[in-house]
Amino acid sequence: MTVLRGRGGPGQGSPGYVSRTRSRAESSGGLSRRDLLRAALVGAGGVALGGALAGCATPSAAGSGKTSVMIWDLFAGGDGALMQEMVGAVAAANPDISVESTTLAWGPPYYTKLAMASSGGRPPEAAIMHMSRLAGYAPGGLLEPFDLDVLAQLGVREEHFAAAVWQKAQYDGQLYALPLDTHPYITFHNPTIVKDAGLARADGKLDLDAVAGADNFLAAGRAMAEVTGETGVGWGYQRDPAGCWRMFWGLYSQNGGEYELTPGRPAALDEEAAAEVFEFLQAMVDGTVAGKNQDGNAAAARFMSQRTGMMFAGEWDLPMFRDALPDVGATQFPAVFGTPANYADSHAFVLPRQGTPDPAGREATYRVLAGLLKEGLTWASAGHIPAYQPIVEEPAYQELTPQRDYAPAAEIAVFDPDAWFTGGGSDFQTRMADAMTDTLAGEASPRTAVTRMLSEMDRFLALPDPA
Amino acid sequence: MTVSNAGVTAPAGPALPVRQASGKRSGTRTGTTRTSMRARDRSGYLFVAPFAIATALFLVVPTLYGLWMSFTNQSLTGAGSEFIGFANYAEAFSDPQVWQTLWHTVWFTILSTVPLVLVALVMALLVHTGLPGQWVWRMSFFVPYLLTSAVVWHLSNWMFQPDIGLLDTWIKGLGLTPLGWLTDENVAMFSIAGVTVWWTVGFNFLLYLAALQGIPAQQYEAATIDGAGGWRRLVSITLPQLRTITGVIVVLQLLASLKVFDQIYMLTAGGPNGSTRPILEYIYDTGFTNYRLGYASAISYVFFALILVFTLVRLLPARKEA
């Protein structure tokens, strides 16, 4: 910059030229030594800092005499603040443990970091994982199983969880994931707009029968669009691979949902059923029922500013929506096709494999995780359906609205297909969304999306299982 | 280095006394016996050591380790590290995704390099002609370069956001159909290249400006005396004098553009329908998201070899000229 500041007047050959060159020579000469030394110092500082950063994961909490437990999570939304609140409560109840919770951005980068930390041997003591990712992690040796006896001593037993959820948390006969919640992909609605569109029940909530069946749903969307003057239903599919996949897989499951994803064999879907799903979605994303070229943020912004009556989103968006619309309603996914089904995933705690196991740290980790499960009521206020059933049975949970209105979603939950490459935040979801965006944008036929998805699935099935 | 520098820069002004002193000191040293000369040589190694160690640890060793991994089926989970010969390379050459994403990288490089050189040149010429308020121009052209990719992502995301973004809102306000800035396969790469030009053009602008200031004023004076106008001076003096720096800028820019990853990863993550996924993202996805480190290393080495060949082809004739 000094070079530039030396240049003042306009034009070439002005008398100022000589002094300009000189000032340049000075600054370049002055650069040589002192600045070099300074740069070397800064560089050395950088190396030292790198060393300090590398030391972050050590379970020491040196000097405090406390056992340190670090937990990684991916709750970057409104639920993250509630997780911090729960961690605070658990830390207060266990003064001998220092609990450090780190929130990382969700999606493929999160799982990349977790896998790298585990394979590097210095992962956090515990981490949040989508249950749908377990198939890709547990066999690879990145995780350690839970000791059921220790959990039982802390009051966490098999009978405290729904059988299907407990089953999903197993691999090779051992418990690898401690289920925290079930989080379905649901619909939120604005009670005022729903009522004005004539879609409300007597108690003011959305009448699920009025939005059941593809034609009914589209008609309801148009009715709401008439009330808002813009769009009826909010759904962001652009730049949101997870949103595309959740919507497709939920609807496809409602429409039969047969699939085969066996490594070494060609992938199979019920192509007719899948094409029907895309026909419906194309009809929905027509600019009236739902916005044509929306991403999740745009859809949410319209919903919160009352320019859309209904919104497809994960229940974890509840804290955000409630801030904007205090009386926001929520229900399970409408029955667009015949079979009741609601896409869902499940957050669970896992124990990444430690390079140097520390029994005291492990014991403390169990206590913290059990404590967090029992803070489930706080977690439920974030929108999630707690997996720990004693919480769900509490009267306080039964009174939470709108949580209780979509609780039935857990009973008809469908999870991601079972394969090592599927699950939340996986490359598979990105590729599936890639395959369908042209069709959703109306630039390709429903069949094209199905063909593209099948060929992508075949590509994944042909890959060697890296675990 | 200090000795020769002192000789050159000594007449330059205030730095003079310091330089002389250092010159004297070095002079006395060079005057002593051969052994101390060797001692000084050895101390040179000491000074180079930190850099050499850092380079070995963080560049040479990982690069060689990556080469080894490309011949194994190494997984990020730690499983599988058997030597499998050229199987990964065979797969890379027959993998359509490799060539598709390589083309996306090349396409981005073309879309970004041409304006990044031309716009930088025009901006530097305009500033150099002496617009009033020089520092304002220099700063506003250069400042975006100082932003981190995350900030650039935030700003451009607000502008390009589908449906509610700044650009779509303006376009709709004019009564036109909004464009899929990041969501239309035919548009997305242009949007990303546009953002990149705005973001990084400042560096090339700076190089051009420095080169312009280095053109001897006598040439312009002589040309003016001979009756050459502004246009003639530009075409016959300025542009030919900028030839060397243009070569440097083009090579630097090509290398920078071929490394594109962050702004694409953050703006579109490779979408829509994979139309902006650069080869580095494919390597990242393969190695880290899908755990296939061995195969990802093989693709990296194919890409590395291509860049190396390209650079050699570009540089060899230049060396002959010199």
Image (cartoon, coloured by chain):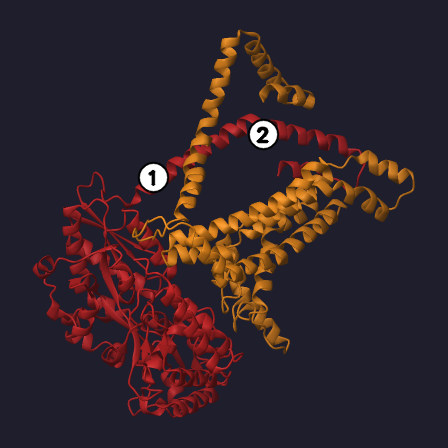
Tag 1 and tag 2, C-beta contact below 8 Å: no
User: Which residue has dot 2 on it?
Assistant: A31
Picture quadrant where residue A451 is located: bottom left
For the C terminus of chain A, the quadrant is bottom left
Chain for numbered disc 2: A
Q: Is residue A426 visible?
A: yes
- Place of residue B81 in the rendered image (x, y in percent of width and height, measured from the top left): 32, 49
- Place of residue A321 in the rendered image (x, y in percent of width and height, measured from the top left): 37, 73
Q: Is residue A328 visible?
A: no
Chain for numbered disc 1: A
The amino acid marked with disc number 1 is: Ala
Q: Colour of chain B?
A: orange
The CA span between labels 1 and 2 is: 30 Å
- Place of residue B237 in the rendered image (x, y in percent of width and height, measured from the top left): 81, 41
A118, above or below A378, in the image? above
Residue at 44 percent of width and 29 percent of height: B50
Q: Which mark is residue B110?
A: none
Which one of the lettered chains is coloured red?
A: A
Q: Secondary structure at mark 2?
A: helix
A221, above or below B222, in the image? below
The amino acid marked with disc number 2 is: Leu
